[in-house]
Image (cartoon, rainbow, N blue to C red):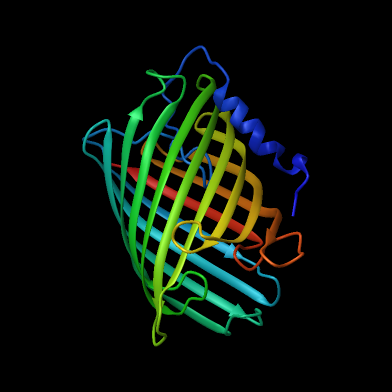
Amino acid sequence: MKRPLHRFAPMLAVCMMVAAPASASDHGVDTEHLFGFTEGSDIGAPPEKELESETTARLGKRGGAFRAVDSALVLKVPLSDRFRLAPGLAFAGYAMRGVPGLDDREVAALAGGFIETRARIFTRDEAPFGLTLNTVIGGSRLDPATGLAASGLSVEAGLLMDREIVPGEVVAGLNVVYALGRSRLAGIAGDQQASNVEISGAVAKRFGPGLFLGLEARYLRAYSGLGLDRFAGQAVYLGPTLYKTLTEETWISFTWGTQLAGSEAGAGEDRDLTNFDRHQVRLRIGTHF
C-alpha cells in the first residue's frame, strides 16, 4: 500500500540537513543523548565513565489495553576516544487485557542482559559529519511481544551519524539500524525468528544553557525470518524530544513518538498495531563519573 509522500517529509528534511554544509563542528556539544530514540555519534573518552538508566514504554494495540515497559541499566566505559564498551541489564513489565491474539497477563521480571560496543569511525572535526558503528548482542528471558517466558538471542547493528547545522545551537542526527533475533517460547517447540530495519532522524535546537528541544521522525519495517525474509509490517513515528543537563555530571532526555502511518501485511489498515505500538515513549537519565 503506497503512502503519501508528505507523511515522510520530516524524515527527508532531517536527511537533507545532515548532508548540508556547516562551517564548524565539535563545539563542546555531546550529541549522544540530544535526541530521543535517535542517538548521536559521540562516545565519551577515558577515564570518564557513565551510568545510564533507560526506560521505554510501548503503549496501545489494535484493541484492548496494552502497556509494556522495557528498562535497562548500563555502564558505559570508553576504552579510548574511538572505542567504548557498555554492559547492561534489562528489565521488563507487561500489562495487557483484551488485546486480540494476546493472553491477558501482568508480569514484571529481569528480562536479560546485553553488551554494547561503539566504534567511532570519524569525528565531526575530521569529516562533514560524525559517524559511529554501534553493535548490541543480548540474551533475553522474556518474549518482547507477549511477555511470555522465553529464551532468546538478538543482534543489532547501527550507523549513528550527526551534524552541527549551527555550531553549538542546532544539531541533526540520522541512524540506520538493522536488528535480528531468535527466540523460543517456554513449552513450545520451534524457534521464532524476526528481523527489522529502522531509519530515524532528529533535529534539536538549544533554547538555554543545557536545554535542547527538537523533533524526531522514525520509519520501521518488520519481517519474519532473520534475513528480512517476509514483510510483516511498517510504521512511521513522529514526536518531540527534550534534553536537559541537571548538573555538570547529570542529564535527562525524553521523547514521545506517536504512530502516524503504517500498514500490516495482509491487512488494509492505515496503521500497523500488531507488530508495532500506538505510542512509544523513552526516558533516559545518566551521570558521568
- Depth check, front residue: 211 or 215: 215
Query: Is residue 170 something that shows in the picture?
Result: no
Query: Along the horizontal axis of the image, is 190 left or right of 36?
Result: left
Q: Is residue 201 above or below residue 224?
A: above
Residue 214 image point, x, y percent: 61, 37
Left or right relative to 219: residue 163: left
224 w.r.t. 241: above or below: below
Q: Can residue 114 be spotted in the picture?
A: yes
Q: Quick one: which residue is furthest to the bottom in this view?
A: 187
Above or below, comparing residue 42 to residue 229 in the picture: above
For residue 10, side relative to residue 157 (left or right): right
Residue 68 in the image: above or below residue 28: below
Q: What residue is shown at x 55% (from left), y 16% (from top)?
A: 21
Give the quarter of the figure containing the N terminus: bottom right
| In the foreground, 5 or 108 | 5
Report which quarter residue 202 is drawn in: top right
- Residue extending farthest front: 229
Q: Quadrant of residue 266?
A: bottom right
Residue that appears at 47% across and 64% down:
225
- Residue 150 picture location, percent across and down: 39, 77
Of residues 210 and 236, the one nearer the viewer is 236
How many numbered marks does the figure carry?
0
The residue most toward the top is 23
Q: Quadrant of residue 102?
A: bottom right
Quarter of the figure that contains the C terminus: top left
Q: Name the residue located 55 percent from the left edge and 27 percent from the top edge.
A: 18
Residue 192 % position (x, y)? 45, 72
